[in-house]
Amino acid sequence: MDTILKLQHVSKQFGRFQALNDVSFTVNRGDIYGLIGENGAGKTTIMRLITHLSPLNSGSITLLGEQAPHYQQALKHVGAAIETPAAFKKLTVKQNLTLAAIQHGIQDKQVITDNIHFVGLDEKATTKASKLSLGQRQRLGLALALLSQPDFLVLDEPINGWILLASCFSGTPEETESRTEHHHFDFQPYFDRVISSLNEVWLHFSRSVY
C-alpha cells in the first residue's frame, strides 16, 4: 500500500508552549484519516506543518515521497483548506474558483462548474463569498481545495457547520483525505478504526475508502 504521508517523532514549540510532542503516524493512499481533539490539542498545527505553513522544530515529515521542508513537487498535488477558507470576500463563488483555476493553469471551465455542483453551491454560484453562511464558506473552501484534482486533501474542521465530506468521498478512492475536528460528534460512520491516542488529549482515526 502506498504511503502518502508519514510523520516521525514530530515536535513543535511556540516559545515555551509545547504544541506537539513526539507525534508519529502514517496515512496510506485511500485512507480517510481524522485528528480528533479539543481546541489547542495541536490538530491545526499538524496541518500547518504538513503543508509547510509553519516550520518544523524536530522530527520528519514525508509527503508524497518528499521530505519537509524540501518539497519540490509534493505541494502541487495537495489540496488544503486550513482555518479560514482562502476565498476573496468581494468575489462570487464562481469568480473565486475561476481565479484559482487560472493560478493552477486550468483552462477547462467545466471543471469550475463541476466543483460548484459537487459541493452543492449551484444556487450560490453568483453570490459573493462575504454573503455565504459558515457552512457555505466551508463548501467553497472544499471546492477550492478540490479544483486541481489533488492526490491528498488536508481539511481543517470540515464538519463545523455541515456533514458532507464522508458521502462526497465514499466514491473517490484515488484521493486521500486528512481532516481535523474537535466537536462532540459520532464519528464512527466516518472513521472506523482507532489508530492510537496521544497524551490523552486527542485521537487519530483512520478508514480506508477502498
Image (cartoon, helix red, strand yellow):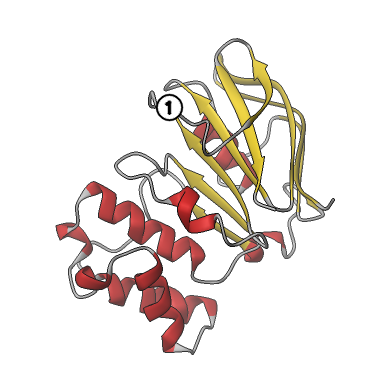
Locate residue 4 relative to residue 79 in the image: left or right: right
Locate residue 104 relative to residue 207 in the image: left or right: left
Residue in front for this viewpoint, 35 or 52: 35
Amino acid type, mark 1: His
Answer above or below: position of 109 versus 35: below
Q: How many marks?
A: 1
Q: Is residue 75 visible?
A: yes
Q: Is residue 54 visible?
A: no
State the residue lying farthest toward the left. Answer: 131
Please provide percent x and percent y for residue 3. 80, 49
Which element type, helix, strand or loop, lies under badge 1? loop
Residue in front for this viewpoint, 1 or 137: 1
Please provide percent x and percent y for residue 195. 70, 26
Locate residue 26 relative to residue 40 in the image: left or right: right
Please provide percent x and percent y for residue 165. 45, 50
Residue in front for this viewpoint, 12 or 193: 193
